[in-house]
Image: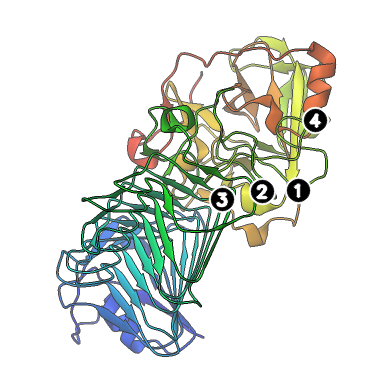
Amino acid sequence: MAVITVTSLGDVTADDGLTTLREAVEQAASGDTVVFDAALAGGRVELTQGRIGIEKDLTIDGDVLGADRRADITLDANGVDQIFAVRGVSSLTLNALVLTGGSVGGGGAVYIAGDATLIVEACTFTGNAAPNGPGGAIWNNGTLTITDSTFAYNHAFGKGGAVFSQGVMTATNTTFTNNTVIAGYPGEGGAISASGNASTQLTLIDCTVTDNVAAGTGATGGGIFQQFGSMALTNTIVSGNTADIGPNVTGDFTDNGGNVIDGDRALIFGTNTLAYNGGPVATVALVDSATNPALDVGVSALADARGKPLYDVPGVGNDGSAFADAGAYEVQCFAGGTRIAVPGGTLPVAELRTGDMVDTADGIPVPVLWIGRQSGPPRALQAVRIGAGALGRGLPLRDLVVTGDHGLVLDGTVVNAAALVDGAGIRWIPARDLPARMTWYHVETEAHSVILAEGAPAETFIDFRGRRAFDNFDEYLALYGVERIIREMPLPRISARRLRAPGCRAQDA
């Protein structure tokens, strides 16, 4: 099993000493992996020679900057054809890629034949089209497995604005939003149409399906259309979609619990739209409100859509129950060994207790009001390692491990760790490199403050995430009875790399 490196963003097959994606796929043997040279990070492969056929087992990995699960490569078909056609008894795995510009009669970006398999991990499908047929992004006749991905702004004629599946499809922690199907049969399934035969299967777990449209008179299933076969939903939101008949779901499904179907879009998402909220791809964030029907309704989830980790521990959950939120999620905290500055030295965050004093970045000690703890498997955590000295000024003093949503205070802004990932000194940590179970910590002080974690300026707890996320929420209630409101410090927050100022470095907060 070899690794073949793409060294050119072109789309030619020529003896020029460079390797294009098309050439890499042709050279690969079954079981090989295609990666991209680091110099191509942020680049766009423009496919001008038509679709790339896949008839072997192959992985194409666009995570150029190293284990961050963020797409560093865009594959753009420029409206010429599909991007991939997977045929025969073969399997294609796509990791950390943006697929756009696919346009063909059916299956705008990818077609999957009956005996073939497509595995999609941490990818974004956007701006693909099937103007004369089904499946704006994907047409599946075989087996389709999707994890941690986003489908947005794809459109099709007749069936499945994002995906048309006649085979077996499973999607986990995936967002489908702003996809459109126009009338043709009439239009069926603004996001997903699963309508093949008795063996057609559709399974959605921890997914969000919102703001999709099945357009035209008689159009049905603004979010999902299902006919024949079977459909099962778990911890999934299907709300705020549009169709003449059945605005959200048309078809029978097995309700495995934790679902919100036909809920009020304004109560669930407010004015939130697709944005980077800490994970590898964009999601639509939930409103943290007592009237939100999607909060604390989930079952058997690792985390919830507000970024609150939830692990399947009986009797422990976001509000003392064993329930997560529905929908796709991101999460946030400090790893247990992180050293926090205290008067006269440092202490591991796991050893801090209520009443201990911690040093703030401006040199004024403040008391710890509470230490929140979250334990669980690494899949939910999206850990970032900030290497010693990577922030400038010799900071952090040693490697600092936090989750992607945790904020560092740099150049007068609060920058989420996910936005700092550069593939060099700051990297995502693959789940395989983490323990099977970890405990993470958050430090609460009187106000939203800046403390020193491994010497680096890092934020303390802010309650827009909610204390009920933590395993020891009962301890907080025993101490204070009711929850305090902590307002965010008056600094802009950067949550995506594209918004970060070049050369962002540590400074005095």
- The reply to whether discs 4 and 1 touch (Cβ–Cβ < 8 Å) is no
Q: Residue 490: image x %, image y %?
A: 46, 13
Kind of residue at badge 1: Asp
Residue indicated by mark 3: 206
Q: Residue 350: image x %, image y %?
A: 80, 33
Q: Give the mark nearest the N terminus, 2 or 3.
A: 3
Residue indicated by mark 1: 312
Q: CA distance from mark 2 to mark 3?
A: 9 Å
Residue indicated by mark 4: 472
* Image depth: mark 2 or mark 3 in front: 3
- The answer to whether residue 291 of the structure is visible from this angle is yes
Q: Give the mark nearest the N terminus, 3 or 1.
A: 3
187 up-or-down from 492: above or below:
below
Residue indicated by mark 2: 302
Of residues 385 and 222, the one drawn nearer to the viewer in this rendering: 222
Q: Residue at x 60, y 14 (%)?
A: 486
Kind of residue at badge 4: Asn
Q: Give the mark nearest the N terminus, 1 or 2.
A: 2
* Image depth: mark 3 or mark 4 in front: 3
Q: CA distance from mark 3 to mark 1?
A: 14 Å
Of residues 481 and 279, the one drawn nearer to the viewer in this rendering: 481
Q: CA distance from mark 1 to mark 2?
A: 7 Å
Of residues 397 and 138, the one drawn nearer to the viewer in this rendering: 138
Quadrant of the rendered structure where residue 47 is?
bottom left
Left/right of residue 256 with respect to residue 227 in the rendered view: right
Q: Give the mark nearest the N terminus, 4 or 1.
A: 1
Determine the secondary structure under disc 3: loop
Label 2 crowd bin: few (<14), some (14–19), many (20+), radius 10 Å: many
Kind of residue at badge 3: Asp
Q: CA distance from mark 4 to mark 1?
A: 15 Å
Q: Give the mark nearest the N terminus, 3 or 4.
A: 3
